[in-house]
Each structure stands twice: as C-alpha cells, then as structure tokens.
Image (tube, rainbow, N blue to C red):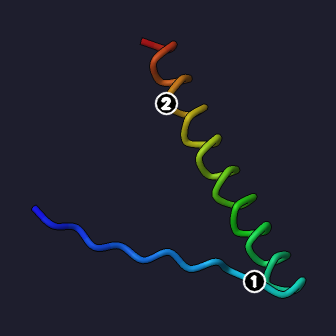
Amino acid sequence: MFNLTYEFKLKPTKTQVAIFEDWLEQCRKVYNYALQERKDWYNSR
C-alpha cells in the first residue's frame, strides 16, 4: 500500500491564533462536560 502525505506549516495571524485558541477551549469544555456526564451516569448505577 502506498500512502502519500503532505505537511504544511501554518503561519496564522494573531487574530487567527485567538480564534483557534477559542475553538480549542470550547472543544475542551464540551469534552469535559460529556466526560463528567458519563462519570455521573456510571457512578449512579
């Protein structure tokens, strides 16, 4: 099997960095909320 990949170095502006950081923070919050919900469900059984 042959797999060809490309890598590109990103050079975001300060505004783009702020947007990316906000996206990552929101993803972290959603993940942690869902994880806590799952733990609560598991512990209530």
**Which residue is rendered at x = 35% and y = 73% of the image?**
5
Which quarter shows the C terminus? Answer: top left
Element type at mark 2: helix
Please give the residue where the numbered disc 1 appears in the rendered image.
11
Q: Residue lying farthest left?
A: 1
Element type at mark 1: loop
Displayed quadrant of residue 20: bottom right
- Under mark 2, the amino acid is Arg
**Which residue is rendered at x = 64% and y = 77% of the image?**
9
Residue 19 shown left or right of residue 6 in the figure: right
Residue 35 in percent (x, y) is at 56, 35
**Which residue is rendered at x = 22% and y = 67% of the image?**
3
Image: 36 above or below 44: below
**Which residue is rendered at x = 77% and y = 84% of the image?**
12
3D distance between C-alphas at marks 2 and 1: 38 Å
Residue 11 in percent (x, y) is at 75, 83
37 or 2, nearer to the observer: 2
Please give the residue where the numbered disc 2 appears in the rendered image.
38
Displayed quadrant of residue 10: bottom right
Q: Between tags 2 and 1, which lies in front?
A: 1
Residue 27 shown left or right of residue 18 in the figure: left
Image: 30 above or below 32: below
Q: Earlier in the sequence, mark 2 or mark 1?
A: 1
Residue 32 in percent (x, y) is at 64, 40
- Under mark 1, the amino acid is Lys
Image: 35 above or below 21: above
3 or 44, nearer to the observer: 3
Residue 43 in percent (x, y) is at 51, 13
9 or 23, nearer to the observer: 9
